[in-house]
Image (cartoon, rainbow, N blue to C red):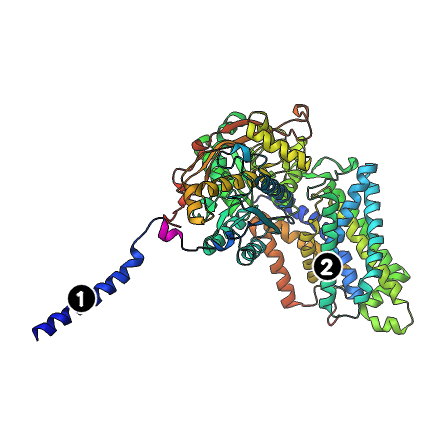
Amino acid sequence: MAQRKKNSVSRRHVLQGAAAAAGALPLIHVPGAFAAEESIGNWPEGAKGPSIFVGVTVPLTGAYSADGHDLQKGYELVFEHLNQGTGLVPHVPSLKGKKGVLGKKIEYKVADTQTQPNPSVQAQTTFITQNKAIMITGCLASNTAIALEKLAQRYRVLNMVGCSGANETTGVDCQKYAFRSQPSAYMAAKALVPALAKAIGRDKKAVYLVPDYAYGHSVEHSTGEFTEKELGWKSLGSQVCPVGTTDYSSYLLNIANSGADVFVNVAFGNDAVASCKQAKQFGILDKMKMIVPNISAFQGQELGPEIMAGVYGTLDFWWTLAETNAMAKIFVDTFYAKYKYRPSWPAHIAYTQMMVWADAVTRAKTFDPRKVIAELEAGHKLQMPLGEIWYRKEDHQEVRAVPVVVGKTKAQMRNDEDLFQIVNLTPGPEVMPPDFLGCKMPTSA
Amino acid sequence: MISWPLFFSQVFNGLTLGALLVLVAMGLTIIFGALGVVNFAHGALYGLGAYAGYVTYLYTESFVAAMAAGAAFLLVVGIVIERGLIRLYYQRPAEDQILVTFGVAIILVEAIRAAFGGLARNIPAPSWAAGIVNLHVTLYPTYRIDVLAIVAASLVLLYFVLYRTRLGLIVRAGIEDQLMVNILGINVTRTFLTVFGLGAMAAGFAGVINAPIVTVTPDMGADILVQSFVVVVIGGVGSFWGAVAGGLIAGEILALTAMIQPAYSQVMLFAAMALVLILRPQGLFGVEGRQ
């Protein structure tokens, strides 16, 4: 009896112990070997062959198409350089002397987003599910950027965000799998304020023209916040308009009658060109000072110095940096040799984002997105056309210099593309939002 | 804060906005009314006209020459498209017509993009219409005021063609009862060709007229096509006065809503269209039962 009881208790204890052990297994975190070997997203399947695939979406039609074509050229150039080991590749220590990424050729396809989020999401879904994209990239509007960030997060595929200026991209909508290089609206506004203090002064009244989506509202909010707090400006309200508007007369009449001293034009792409041109026609630019917090890729070229001279704003990159930065010179010269014009900032975003990604993958020695994310989060500093750049772990925002520019007059221009003068190259750490703009980054991928 | 000067400025602006919409919608409504074809290529034809004007302006630096070239080139393009494609679709279902005109629009827009790139082009306002006029309630671009006169003159000309010529009589008869026109032995084929050509010409002309105001880009017709359809629906299909009234109403809705709540101006335009569709489905000047 006693024997049976002893055996019975023992068996129950064994079973209980086994069950407890089985239940506890998933809770035990085994760094490295165990967890990293588990497949995730398109890894390792997408990295098994001699090449890897990158899904690229850019607006080739619609209001942001001019910027989109420049972005596309940036991707074409950087993939060519990475595959051939040319351009900036020999100047990045981890990539020096190498062709491809981890010896694999980069293949890619470009899809047109039509300046809309839905076609972007559809195209990238196809790239992820059918082409087994190991990384996705490209966009030119923050609503698209945020939609693609969520898509990449859902599929556990790395997303090197293209052009996006809204705070939300690395703020409240930040994602573990997404990294953004363009300055946020917060960074641009903070960088712009010292130049505005000198050029326009304190205690002014400002009125805004705002495209009705995340980017527009974000730029209005941040520019308003900094100019009000640091310059004592007062906002007289905003004219909110849809993206793709062609005639701004109704909004501009409200602006003309607002009594403001400063016209803050947040419209972007073709919309920026049309609204600036019409603002000139309505006499607004003769009685108000216009500022453009984020200047579109070809806004200077399309409007000319007649409208853009004296206009302050920020750019992600401007080609005259090539005169002071050796990396920028290589980028600008190789781009010019291939496309016969000097690159604008969307091409710069495409180019440097891909270089940074290739560097992170090479240092991680794997395409496993968890390890690549860890490398990007490690804050490794890299010399690029803007100087030293790196990513913040807390919100995946690139820490990078912000060029503050002013439009040149016709007499100041040395050639047709010499449209802006860099008045300040604000160091990245000075303009980073300390509170991460509401980003709550998960600790693990 | 809404003030009387702002109110009067916006009422006036609604008029000029509306005038441009009338010009674009007129071609659309004539083609729709006479041929029964929902021409989704109308926006692309409008853009093509602007580019034809742009090229002419580059070589001649004459805005008048640009206007003439935009209109003439699109008359030819309209004739080619009608003979080469559209005539094959008159007897086919409406959805086929929509698809084919939509396809033509895509081809035209992408052809423009291939030839000129995506950067915005500019036709400056002519020297006789440059500058700003002080209307006392507001400053207003001279060119936009001149556009009112240009549109009015064009409409008078079109009215004359439609209501005082034999061609106009046939077109209007075709809008009312196509079968009867056929039975009476009138060469409807030639009339259809003329109508489509005239419609395309109106679109091209509107493209050049609008170019100094907006920017010339390959996609420039997309936005105005949608607004023109709204104008046609509000005014009534195939109605000359419907297009005029619809355009002016649409212009005022856009301007006055923008004055009160800018974000809702486009929404209100569609709300007005929905209201017309509920209360008077044939449009303000449309005839009930017209196909």
Q: Check disc 1: other Cα within 10 Å, few if <14, some if 14-19, many if 20+.
A: few
Location of residue A259 by image quarter: top right
Q: Amino acid at mark 1?
A: His
Q: Amino acid at mark 2?
A: Gly
The vertical placement of B127 against B273, above or below, is: above
Q: Would you name the residue on which mark 1 appears?
A: A13
The rendered magenta stretch, by its main secondary structure, is classed as helix
Whether B195 is among the magenta residues is no
**Label 1 and label 2 in one chain:** no
Q: Which mark is residue B103?
A: 2
The vertical placement of A391 against A425, above or below, is: below
Q: Nearer the viewer, residue A57 or B128?
A: A57
Residue A344 lies, in percent from the top left, at 61, 36
Residue A148 lies, in percent from the top left, at 51, 51
Q: Which mark is residue B72?
A: none
Q: In the rendered structure, which segment of residues is drawn in magenta?
A: A33-37
Q: Residue furthest front?
A: A3
Q: Nearer the viewer, residue B251 or A270?
A: A270
The local secondary structure at tag 1 comes to helix
Q: Nearer the viewer, mark 1 or mark 2?
A: 1
Q: Residue at x 42, y 42 (%)?
A: A375
Residue B14 lies, in percent from the top left, at 67, 49
Q: Is residue A80 left or right of residue A29?
A: right
